[in-house]
Image (cartoon, rainbow, N blue to C red):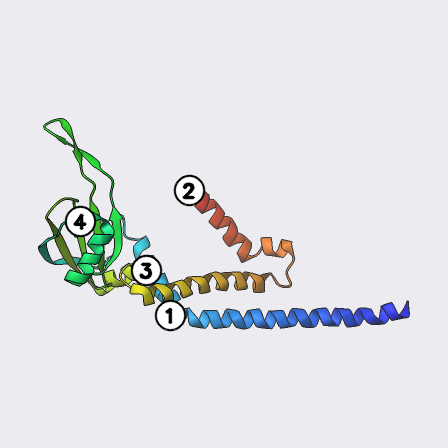
């Protein structure tokens, strides 16, 4: 009996040490992730706020995108075999690397009141956040028009927010920021919940924010 009593405090002390060690590691991880993504949070928060207010009478400026040039190019028959072949030809012959390739479906138009089938169109685009290009090609045509555009700094950073024009390096960096935000949220919830009862959590700011999110999200998705 005495042995059981004497070992109980040791077990409790060991549990507390493990809990404190976990707390220190999670807290340090939370701080490291916060430091890594601090500037990204400012950038994404700013651009997200700008894009969230792009509609309505008092819409915020979204930056400017202007046409900087147009050119009609001849497309060889071999390049028109598939969207991938066209993208490869553009890269090798014109130095245009297509980041996005979209193959549309056949449409239908009305001419003189009669329905007329429209062929599927291929849309290719690429470039950087500041300078971009796009091309629409109808399979079988001998030519296509390439449109060049320039984007203001504000328009460029909103394009980066949407993952457009940043290239592979930006895509990997943005993924690291996104994963960091997930870990930041999870570690923050764990740190907040430590030492609190379920009732205290429900009545805390976390419980309030969760309730507001559920209500607003449900209304938006209804």
Instruction: Give the residue displayed 32% in from the left and 59% down from the top.
Output: 163
Q: Identify whether 86 is placed above or below 165.
A: above
Task: Assess disc 2: are there few (<14), some (14-19) or many (≥20) residues with their C-alpha within 10 Å of its C-alpha.
Answer: few
Residue placed under numbered mark 1 in the picture: 39
Question: How many numbered discs?
Answer: 4
Q: Which circle's residue, 4 or 3, is located before the other in the chain?
A: 4
Left or right: where does residue 55 sit relative to residue 150?
right
Q: In x, y percent, where is residue 90?
A: 18, 58
* Quadrant housing the C terminus: top left
The answer to whether residue 59 of the structure is visible from this angle is no
Q: Residues within 10 Å of mark 1 (few under 14, many from 20)?
A: few
Q: Which mark is residue 161?
A: 3
Mark 4, Cα crowd under 10 Å, few <14 / some 14-19 / many 20+, is many
Q: CA distance from mark 2 to mark 1?
A: 31 Å
Q: Mark 3: which secondary structure?
A: helix
Residue 99 in sight here? yes
Q: What whole-number distance in Å separates the C-alpha atoms at marks 4 and 3? A: 33 Å
Residue visible at 44% across and 46% down in the picture: 217
Q: Quadrant of residue 171?
A: bottom left
Of circles 4 and 3, the one toward us is 4
Tell me the tag on residue 216. Answer: none
Q: Nearer the viewer, mark 1 or mark 4?
A: 4
- First in sequence, mark 4 or 2: give its number: 4
Which circle, 4 or 2, is nearer the viewer? 4
Which residue is nearer to you in this view: 69 or 196? Answer: 69
* Residue linked to disc 2: 221
The residue pinned by badge 4 equals 80
Mark 3 and mark 1 lie on one chain; the one further toward the N terminus is 1
Real-space CA distance between mark 1 and mark 4, rounded to the nearest whole angstrom: 44 Å
């Amino acid at each position: 009996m005495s042995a059981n009593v004497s070992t109980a405090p040791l077990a409790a002390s060991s549990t507390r040490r493990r809990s404190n060690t976990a707390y220190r590691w999670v807290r340090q991880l939370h701080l490291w992730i916060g430091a890594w993504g601090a500037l990204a949070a400012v950038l994404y928060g700013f651009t997200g706020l700008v894009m969230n207010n792009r509609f309505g009478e008092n819409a915020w400026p979204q930056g400017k995108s202007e046409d900087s040039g147009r050119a009609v190019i001849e497309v060889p028959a071999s390049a028109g075999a598939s969207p991938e072949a066209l993208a490869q030809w553009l890269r090798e012959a014109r130095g245009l690397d297509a980041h996005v390739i979209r193959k549309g479906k056949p449409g239908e138009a009305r001419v003189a009141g009669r329905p007329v089938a429209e062929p599927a169109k291929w849309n290719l685009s690429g470039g950087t956040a500041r300078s971009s290009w796009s091309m629409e090609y109808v399979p079988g045509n001998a030519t296509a028009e390439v449109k060049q555009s320039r984007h203001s700094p504000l328009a460029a950073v909103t394009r980066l927010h949407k993952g457009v024009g940043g290239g592979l390096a930006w895509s990997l960096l943005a993924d690291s920021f996104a994963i960091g935000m997930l870990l930041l949220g999870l570690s923050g919830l764990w740190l907040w919940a430590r030492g609190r009862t379920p009732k205290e959590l429900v009545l805390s700011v976390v419980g309030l924010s969760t309730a507001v999110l559920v209500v607003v999200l449900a209304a938006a998705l209804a």
